[in-house]
Structures are given as structure tokens and as C-alpha cells.
Amino acid sequence: MPLRSHCSDTSSASLLIAIDSSEEMLKNLTDKSITSIVSDARDMKEIQNNSIDVILIIFAIHHINGKNYSSAISSLKKVIEVSNKKLTTNGEIVIVELTLNDVFFFIQRLLYKFTYNILKFLKTDMVFFYKDKTIISSLLEISNNSKIEIENIKMKGWLDPFLGTFPGIIKIPAFLMPTSMKLFRSKK
């Protein structure tokens, strides 16, 4: 099923919940039928286990990080583990995220601590882009029986190579971006 039809048809949903650690972001919701919860995705304690059919994690994984690389990986695994606990028996996790190839990921990982400290000094949120293999292995850890589907999503136009870290500084053609956009789907 294409991303657009999968994510935009909410007519059959009995309950829609938006979770964000930022109350400010949740204030941007215009659809009053969506329940908003201020929470960290690493716990989601307000949501009952085995109660959600589909969890969408859209352009959020790169904000899941920590003070160092290993804490970033631990945080990613925790979000996926907690999400899986919230899913019903046939539930599904859908992740839409920008990922890096192995070379750019290696460079980003080498510069992790430096980048973290610079962005902390500038009072800007840290972003860390994972590679496909890292997301896939995190999904597989929650269930070895999971079937994971990956769909490439073509990026077009002029895009911000800093991906919002320093908004509006520069724009480059999509084909020059060091990231690619992917949809990961894992059924419980």
C-alpha cells in the first residue's frame, strides 16, 4: 500500500493519539479528534500495552539520540521496544525516516560527540540520522518473526542539507542530499 493511502486514511480509526515530548509541537494539531499526550516515546506510560493497532513514527527517529553514540542506539531500541509492547497482536509499526548510507553514517558517528557539544552550546536540538541496517536490526530485536518491508520514497525539489538544524541557511537539489527517505513497516 502506498504511503499516502496508508497514512492519510484515518476514517476507520476509533482513536488517534499524537505523542510528542514537546507540548509546543502538540499545540500545532488542528484536528480536535486527535488525542494529544505529552510524553517521551521511550516510555509511553499513558498508553496501555496491547492496545494500539498501528504506531506511526514519522520523521522522529533522528531526534532520538543521547549524549553519545551508544546512548543514541539504546534510545532507538527503547522506542521500538516500547512501541512493540503497545501494539495489539497483529499490530504494526510504520517508520518514515531519512537514513544515511554507510559512508556518511560512519562520518556522522565519528563526529557525534563534537556535534552534540556544538549543538548543545548553540541550544539547538541534536539530530542523528541512522542507517537502514540500524533501524532494521532494532526492529528485528523485538521479534525475529517480524517481516520488515522497506519502501524508498523519492525526494524532489530543493531541500535543506542541515535538515532543520540551522533552518533556511542553504538549499540544495534533492539528488545531492546525503540522506534517502525510507518507509519501514514491521508487523507484530
Image (cartoon, grey):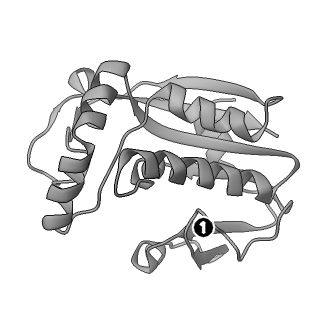
Q: Is residue 106 visible?
A: yes
Q: Looking at the rendering, which quadrant does residue 184 occupy?
A: top right
Quadrant location of residue 180?
Answer: top left
- Work out which residue is located at the far left of the displayed protein and give it: 169
**Image x and y of residue 159, in percent:** 23, 37
Q: Is residue 101 above or below residue 94?
A: above
The residue located at (51%, 73%) in the rendering is 30
Instruction: Count up the numbered dots.
Output: 1
- Which residue is at 61% across, 54% downward? 78
The three-letter amino acid code for the residue at tag 1 is Ala
Q: Nearer the viewer, residue 116 or 20?
A: 116
The answer to which of 32 and 41 lies nearer the viewer is 41
Report the side of 72 relative to 128 (left or right).
right
Q: Is residue 72 left or right of residue 169?
A: right
Residue under the point 18% across and 48% down = 114
Image side of residue 46 versus residue 136, left or right? right
Residue at 48%, 72% in the rendered image: 21
Residue 143 x/y as whole percent: 79, 36
Please say if 17 is above or below 153. below
* In-front residue for pair 89/25: 89
Measured as percent of width and height from the top left, residue 71 is found at 45, 52
Q: For this view, does 150 lie left or right of residue 28?
A: right
* Quadrant location of the C terminus in the rendered image: top right
Instruction: Using the rendered image of the protein, determine whether residue 178 is visible from the camera's viewpoint.
Output: no
Q: Badge 1 is on which residue? A: 18
**Quadrant that contains the N terminus:** top right
Q: Secondary structure at mark 1?
A: strand
Nearer-the-camera pick, 113 or 146: 113
Question: How dense is the environment of label 1, judged by Cα within 10 Å: few (below 14), some, or many (20 and up)?
Answer: some
Q: Position of residue 167 (x, y in %)?
A: 17, 54
